[in-house]
Image (spheres, rainbow, N blue to C red):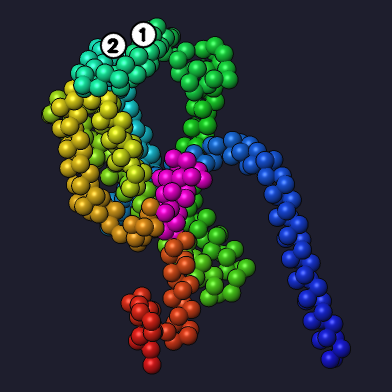
């Protein structure tokens, strides 16, 4: 019996060593083939585009579906059939979301098109005005003026030639605009037919995504139950319950932040459009779109949207640019101190330092998407780490409050 236990311990050590070595070799192999692995996941993501779109669409529709479902249960006093009520709420949420997107694009795209065309046509006058202002500003410094003005004139002439000779003619008709979009978004294809083919593929993916989103919402309770079933089959009951609780908490953080941020940014965009129209700032639709879209990015969003908008207005009227800067400052203070906390609440539970850290980290790794999703994703990891730390302190009988660990000695212990 003792001999068998001795060999069992050797076998356990051997299996552990083998697993460690195999994991190390696998990690080394992944580092050597990192480009191929990245290409594989990129190809996989391309194939699964409809599924990814469907997941995103279902995620955005879920709050609407739950709201409609509660409404149906309220008016029927809970007597309505579950399947038909669920289907009706999903259908209404899909119609509502598509209607919102359609109205948004129908109101915004024509305004943006008119603003862009007007900006391109007015650019020569803005360049001349800026040149006159620069010459007057550098009048008392002829040496600097002699260096900067030729550089400015050369850059301005090149920009004007590109705007008037290339960009503007391609915006004056539908066919030329399609050619421009083709060169920007589909540089690898040739001809309008190829662009239309890619558009058809995209429409196909969107239609499949809609079907997938409806199926996911209709079967979400079953999928959730199956996931819990698998979890409880693989883990001890206490650990499985902890994992389920953390998953629910992660969804609460992610959905609360993303949905809230979209609503917050939409309201800020509308307020910005109304304010720019009232104060007669140039290109109100274009400016409001830039400010509203970039406001989705926490912390840096207001600066990302306000700076190019400021310089755009500066080309038209420097005094209006100054007024616009004051308007944006007031608007962002309203968003940061009143509207944002009212909509988002404390959905992430992160301090300002960790918000900045997560934006810089995930933004550097994944670009604009990382800047948007970095805060809620980091908040999920932060919440898990905080729960583990509190559990460890509780097992050791140590205080949970951070203030107890300030200074040289641990306070609040027996």
Q: Which of 326 and 237 is in front in this view?
A: 326
* Dominant SS in magenta: helix
Residue segment shown in magenta: 357-380
Which residue is denoted by mark 1 in the rendering?
164
**Picture coordinates of residue 340 (x, y %)?**
25, 50
Which residue is denoted by mark 2 in the rendering?
124
Q: Does the stretch in magenta take in 373? A: yes
**Picture coordinates of residue 23 (x, y %)?**
72, 60
Q: Which of 56 and 182 is in front in this view?
A: 182
Query: Image height check: is 122 above or below 308?
Result: above
* Count of labels in the image: 2
**Picture coordinates of residue 365 (x, y %)?**
51, 45
Left or right placement of residue 111 versus residue 366 in this view: left
What residue lies at 76% left-to-right and 61% top-to-bottom? 22
Q: Nearer the viewer, residue 9 or 204?
A: 9
Quadrant of the rendered structure where residue 143 is?
top left
Q: In which quarter of the image is the C terminus?
A: bottom left
**Picture coordinates of residue 304 (x, y %)?**
33, 37
The mark that comes first in sequence, 2 or 1, is 2
> Circle 1 — which element?
helix
Residue 113 seen from this side: no
Left or right placement of residue 27 versus residue 300 in this view: right
């Amino acid at each position: 019996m003792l001999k068998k236990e001795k060999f069992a311990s050797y076998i356990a050590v051997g299996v552990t060593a083998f697993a460690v070595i195999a994991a190390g070799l696998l990690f080394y192999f992944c580092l050597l083939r990192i480009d191929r692995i990245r290409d594989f996941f990129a190809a996989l993501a391309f194939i699964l585009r409809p599924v990814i779109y469907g997941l995103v669409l279902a995620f955005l529709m879920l709050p609407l579906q739950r709201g409609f479902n509660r409404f149906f249960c309220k008016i029927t006093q809970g007597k309505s059939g579950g399947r038909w009520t669920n289907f009706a709420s999903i259908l209404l949420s899909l119609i509502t979301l598509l209607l919102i997107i359609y109205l948004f694009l129908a109101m915004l795209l024509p305004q943006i098109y008119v603003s862009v065309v007007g900006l391109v046509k007015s650019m020569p006058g803005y360049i001349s005005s800026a040149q006159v202002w620069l010459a007057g500003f550098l009048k008392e410094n002829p040496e600097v003026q002699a260096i900067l003005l030729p550089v400015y004139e050369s850059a301005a002439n090149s920009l004007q030639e590109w705007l008037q000779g290339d960009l503007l003619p391609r915006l004056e008709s539908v066919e030329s605009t399609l050619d421009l979009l083709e060169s920007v978004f589909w540089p690898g294809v040739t001809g309008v037919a190829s662009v239309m083919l890619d558009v058809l593929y995209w429409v196909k993916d969107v239609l499949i995504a809609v079907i997938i989103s409806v199926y996911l919402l209709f079967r979400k309770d079953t999928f959730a139950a199956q996931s819990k079933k698998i979890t409880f089959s693989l883990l001890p009951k206490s650990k499985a319950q902890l994992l389920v609780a953390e998953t629910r908490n992660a969804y609460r953080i992610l959905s609360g932040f993303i949905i809230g941020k979209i609503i917050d940014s939409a309201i800020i965009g509308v307020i910005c459009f109304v304010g720019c129209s009232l104060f007669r700032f140039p290109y109100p639709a274009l400016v409001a779109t830039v400010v509203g879209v970039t406001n989705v990015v926490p912390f840096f969003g207001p600066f990302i949207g306000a700076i190019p908008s400021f310089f755009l207005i500066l080309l038209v009227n420097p005094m209006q640019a100054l007024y616009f800067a004051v308007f944006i400052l007031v608007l962002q203070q309203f968003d940061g101190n009143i509207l944002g906390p009212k909509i988002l609440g404390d959905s992430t539970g992160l301090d300002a330092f960790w918000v900045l850290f997560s934006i810089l980290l995930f933004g550097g790794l994944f670009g604009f998407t990382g800047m948007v999703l970095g805060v809620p994703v980091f908040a999920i990891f932060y919440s898990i780490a905080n729960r583990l730390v509190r559990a460890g302190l509780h097992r050791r009988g140590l205080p949970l409050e951070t203030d107890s660990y300030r200074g040289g000695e641990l306070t609040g212990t027996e």
